[in-house]
Amino acid sequence: MLVLAAIALILPAYFQSAVGTTTQGLDRLSVSISIVLLLAYLLNLAFALVTHRALFAGSHEADEGKAQPSKARAISVLAGTTVGIAWMSEILVGTIEPATHELGLSKIFVGVFVVAVMGNAVEHATAIFAAMKDRMDLSLSIAIGSSVQIALFVAPVLVLASLFLGPLPMDLAFPAGLVLLVLVSVLITAQVANDGRSDWLEGIQLLTIYLVLGLTLFFVPANSTSSH
């Protein structure tokens, strides 16, 4: 699914470079791809929760004997958490924008690293705790699942919502630099997920790549056109 998401986000950039930015075809393409991605996301949920749920059921010994929460409680906790995260995100965005201008940081650095890390802090902590318990399959699923959700659900929803709420329609044509980062990230993720093992050196390599990407975006000028 991650490869599918990457391809769907890369193709609008190719379309833009081929036909230019003065055509309405890019908007129609973005809407069409968004609908396809949402359908793929729904089918992915059906695969994981309905038709092949046994493949995703945990079998770790630590889970045995534990009482499972009721569906009503799980839904209520999820709903409350969603509202709380939305409220905190509004506070974060309103607070970080003045600091961004004051420090001269580019929007792409703030969006890709600062907001992404702070907004998903709980998710990152869960993945780390799972890895510390030697549950690397769960840790990797959390990390990859988050990216898939952003690409297949959040981005398409934003594109469709911009048709009614935004001053201008949003498209999926990202700058060439960001498209390259997406492609590199997918290749690295595929290599990590397919080798069937994990060790501390592999973790150091991933952290090094993340640090290099962060340094690269940190030195992008704040007024760069690729930041918009």
Image (spheres, rainbow, N blue to C red):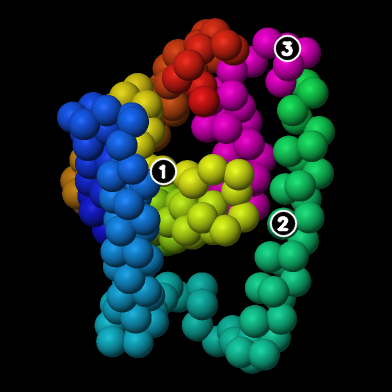
Q: Please tell me in which quadrant of the rendered image residue 223 appears.
A: top right
Q: Is residue 44 above or below residue 145?
A: below
Q: Amino acid at mark 3?
A: Leu
Spatial separation of the CA atoms under disc 1 and disc 2: 23 Å
Circle 3 residues within 10 Å: few <14, some 14–19, many ≥20: few
Residue 182 showing in the rendered view: no
The disc, 1 or 2, on the residue closer to the chain's N-terminal end is: 2
Residue at x 78%, y 55% (from the top left corner):
87
Q: In front here: 148 or 12?
A: 12
In the rendered image, residue 5, in percent from the top left (x then y), is placed at 30, 51
Residue under pointer 2: 86
Residue under pointer 1: 171
Q: Is residue 223 above or below residue 4?
A: above
Residue at x 39%, y 82% (from the top left corner):
49
Q: In front here: 214 or 19?
A: 19
Considering the image in quadrants, where does the N terminus appear?
bottom left
Residue 107 is covered by the magenta coloring? yes
| Residue 152 located left or right of residue 83 | left
